[in-house]
Image (spheres, rainbow, N blue to C red):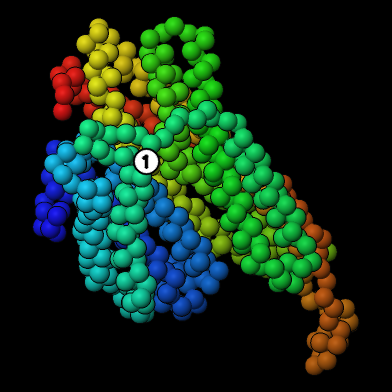
């Protein structure tokens, strides 16, 4: 097969196939734009004083800003992955037709890879163009030479080239990996997988991850850490425990949905519930894959709210320590209102980012439900042709989505809160000052330094309150996004309930 033929076959197909290309390109564009902004933040010289925001000038804050942007790119990459799966059953049938026409399995892989790779490449080009255009349009230097954004900093060219190459390459590899369990033959599709029973052992991953975080909190207060030793070991341990917690969360939700579905089959005879339970039992991990981004966002959001509560308590502790009676201050020697205001601004930015992540997660879930509906359209159409009301199918979709989503969101919020609370259960602070212990004449003389004595106040420890209201708000926003996705998917399901879908493709 010539390259020109591969290109023509890659972009042939139905409306769903043609819609998959711009959606994948848009997701890749957002991913490239976020990663380039993250690389720009990492290139900034700390303490440069060239920008308005303290978030872009603090040496300890810059890595956290870059890490937050990197975390934001993860759900965007999930969106790109889900876009690549949109209309997968129809695409696989089209590839099977190519096999019937004489194409080899390798040529089929090239066709699928070229389709996703070119779409991601187009998106990468658009994202890069938007990045450089934004640098020129948003470059606004004030009278004092400071800027609101780091538009005067450009990441090293190897990093830019690496990002531009990595995004379409990862998208293409993902498409090839997704096809590894599908043997495309001239007679159709053969799924090379067997349904396995869902086990409860992923809960052990949750327990181990949370216990590891608690152990890290003990290690952080050890003498070796105070001396600056074993920092790299702590970072690796924190990353490993976080991965264990997220994996345990994702697969535990699959087990919960599977268990609830089995229980509902025994206690109810409502048609909508029975349909939803059977669909969940048929592929319990489908829900966990689809809800991964929402669950991770909810967990990180709850952790962020817990961290903000600790920051607020930390300001109160430091203020109380400065006003310790043993120090003799009439008023606090340092005004912490600026610190509190800055932390409040960061909190507002984090809330905005979380809402953006929930929106991306909702779009990912919507695409997953649309793809799942297309895959089941023959079964849905058969139910309608057999007399099943469309309202029953709509309620079945609601049950199928909420069955794992509702407990999953609650568990994700609690897990995120507890994971951060292992490090932020209390806030401790103290203050000290130099006090002259000589006479008034001695303290006023040139040798006053000889009579100076360092006096340290008491150590204050406050319990950090759990921000249940803010955590509930994050969980409610995630649940609201899921409900909106359900409403949209119910509207889109009407085309799948047409009995004409029973005709052969």
Q: Residue at x 79, y 59 (%)?
A: 459
> Position of 125 compared to 366: left or right?
left
Residue 311 visible here: no
Q: Residue at x 35, y 17 (%)?
A: 395
> Position of 477 compared to 213: left or right?
left
Q: Nearer the viewer, residue 306 or 423?
A: 423
In the figure, residue 370 lies in which quadrant? top left
Residue 151 percent across, percent down from the top left: 32, 72
> What residue would you read off at disc 1?
181
In the figure, residue 443 lies in which quadrant? bottom right
Neighbor class of circle 1 (other Cα within 10 Å; few <14, some 14-19, many 20+) is: few
Q: Nearer the viewer, residue 169 or 313?
A: 169
Query: Looking at the image, which residue sits at the far bottom?
Result: 446
Residue 444 percent across, percent down from the top left: 80, 86
Q: Residue at x 64, y 57 (%)?
A: 237
Work out which quarter of the rendered image holds the N terminus and state it: bottom left
SS class, disc 1: loop
Residue 330, above or below 20? below
> Position of 70 compared to 117: left or right?
right
Residue 373, above or below 130? above
């Amino acid at each position: 097969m010539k390259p020109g033929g591969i290109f023509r076959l890659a972009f042939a197909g139905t409306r769903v196939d043609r819609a998959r290309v711009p959606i994948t390109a848009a997701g890749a564009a957002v991913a490239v734009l976020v990663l380039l902004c993250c690389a720009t933040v990492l290139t900034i010289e700390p303490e440069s004083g060239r920008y308005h925001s303290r978030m872009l000038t603090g040496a300890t804050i810059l890595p956290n800003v870059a890490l937050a942007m990197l975390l934001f790119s993860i759900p965007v990459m999930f969106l790109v992955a889900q876009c690549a799966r949109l209309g997968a059953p129809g695409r696989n049938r089209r590839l099977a037709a190519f096999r019937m026409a004489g194409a080899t399995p390798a040529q089929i892989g090239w066709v699928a890879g070229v389709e996703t790779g070119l779409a991601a490449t187009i998106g990468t080009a658009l994202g890069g163009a938007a990045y450089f255009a934004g640098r020129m349009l948003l470059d606004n230097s004030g009278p004092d030479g400071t800027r609101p954004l780091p538009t005067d900093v450009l990441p090293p060219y190897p990093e830019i080239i690496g990002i531009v190459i990595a995004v379409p390459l990862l998208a293409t590899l993902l498409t090839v990996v997704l096809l590894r369990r599908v043997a495309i033959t001239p007679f159709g599709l053969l799924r090379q997988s067997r349904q396995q029973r869902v086990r409860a052992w992923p809960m052990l991953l949750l327990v181990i991850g949370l216990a590891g975080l608690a152990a890290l909190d003990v290690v952080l207060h050890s003498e070796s850490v105070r001396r600056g030793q074993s920092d790299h070991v702590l970072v690796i341990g924190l990353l490993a425990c976080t991965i264990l917690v997220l994996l345990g969360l994702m697969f535990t939700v699959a087990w919960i949905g599977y268990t609830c579905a089995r229980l509902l089959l025994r206690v109810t005879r409502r048609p909508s519930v029975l349909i939803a339970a059977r669909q969940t039992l048929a592929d319990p991990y489908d829900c966990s894959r689809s809800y991964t981004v929402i669950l991770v966002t909810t967990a990180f959001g709850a952790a962020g709210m817990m961290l903000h509560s600790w920051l607020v308590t930390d300001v109160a502790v430091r203020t109380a320590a400065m006003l310790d009676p043993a120090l003799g201050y009439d008023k606090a020697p340092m005004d912490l209102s600026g610190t509190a205001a800055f932390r409040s601004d960061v909190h507002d930015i984090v809330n905005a980012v979380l809402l953006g992540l929930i929106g991306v997660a909702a779009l990912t879930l919507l695409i997953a439900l649309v793809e799942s509906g297309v895959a089941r359209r023959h079964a849905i159409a058969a139910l309608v042709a057999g007399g099943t009301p469309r309202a029953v199918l709509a309620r079945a979709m609601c049950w199928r989505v909420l069955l794992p989503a509702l407990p999953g969101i609650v568990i994700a919020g609690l897990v995120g809160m507890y994971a951060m609370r292992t490090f932020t259960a209390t806030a401790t602070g103290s203050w000290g000052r130099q006090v002259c212990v000589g006479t008034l004449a001695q303290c006023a003389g040139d040798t006053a330094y000889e009579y100076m004595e360092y006096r340290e106040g008491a150590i204050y420890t406050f319990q950090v309150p759990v921000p249940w209201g803010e955590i509930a708000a994050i969980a409610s926003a995630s649940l609201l996004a899921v409900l909106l996705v359900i409403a949209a998917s119910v509207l889109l399901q009407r085309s799948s309930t047409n009995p004409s879908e029973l005709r052969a493709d």
